[in-house]
Amino acid sequence: MTHVLLIEPDAGVRMRLRKELGALAFLVSTAECGREGIRAVRGLRPDLVLLDLDLDDMDGLEVLGLLHTHGGPPIVAAVPAHDERRAVKALRAGADDCVSKPFQVTMLAARLDALARRLGRRPVLRVGDLTIDRAAHEVRLSNRPLRLRPREFELLCYLASREGRIISKRELQREIWDTPPGCVRTVDVHLSMLRKRLGESAARPRYLHSFRGVGVKLHAPGP
């Protein structure tokens, strides 16, 4: 599974790309401005960055240069269609590829796939005896298939890609359900169902651990 960080100021575009790329076997995290994107690259360590150069808080080329200079992940720059001059500037500033806006998602996914292949990314996540194949939409625990609903699957993928990190329920609500902060009851219900699928409980966790008032994390059980 390829983890893409989308740095995009338009909330509608962020929502659409996260859903459409997610359906095409990408894990997508988002940031709405340059500074947030730089922090997300350092904290989340994505495989690829899709960077819209038209940011509100910083010059997109400046963000691109900072990420490139500090050895960040490969960057795909998004530039307006037919703006060849800007695409050339982006490539010279360190972009590994350029795509045109407005996005044609099928072509965008193909370009991201090609870049991911050059990176040698594996499409499978493994956490202990838990194996998650996002492209095939399959999960196995100790080689036994688990049947998950779509939201449960997305939730598991999000946690597994951040193995060992405590993730707040507000972050899960924002990234998986794309809803503003507020009631996290939906998150609680899905975490409870996911625990049942994994054959554990909140009182006796193996993979999924809760931290009251902080969040949850997924990690492999000890020997």
Image (cartoon, rainbow, N blue to C red):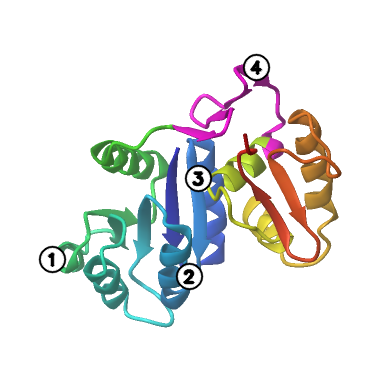
Q: Which residue is mark 2?
A: 9
Q: Nearer the viewer, mark 4 or mark 3?
A: 4
Residues drawn in magenta: 124-152
Q: Is residue 199 magenta?
A: no
User: What secondary structure is found at the residue carrying circle 1?
Assistant: helix
Mark 3: few/some/many CA within 10 Å (<14, 14-19, 20+): many
Question: Is residue 13 visible in this depiction of the protein?
Answer: no
The answer to which quarter of the image holds residue 216 is: bottom right
Residue that sits furthest to the top in the current view? 144
Residue 92, labelled with which disc?
1
Q: Residue reaching furthest front?
A: 223
Of residues 10 and 190, the one drawn nearer to the viewer in this rendering: 190
Residue where numbered disc 3 is placed: 27
Proximity of marks 4 and 3: CB atoms separated by less than 8 Å? no
91 in relation to 16, above or below: below
Q: CA distance from mark 4 to mark 3?
A: 24 Å
Report how far apart the C-alphas of labels 1 and 3 lie in the structure: 28 Å
For the point 19% across and 64% down, the residue is 94
| Residue 76 quadrant | bottom left
Residue 119 visible at all: yes
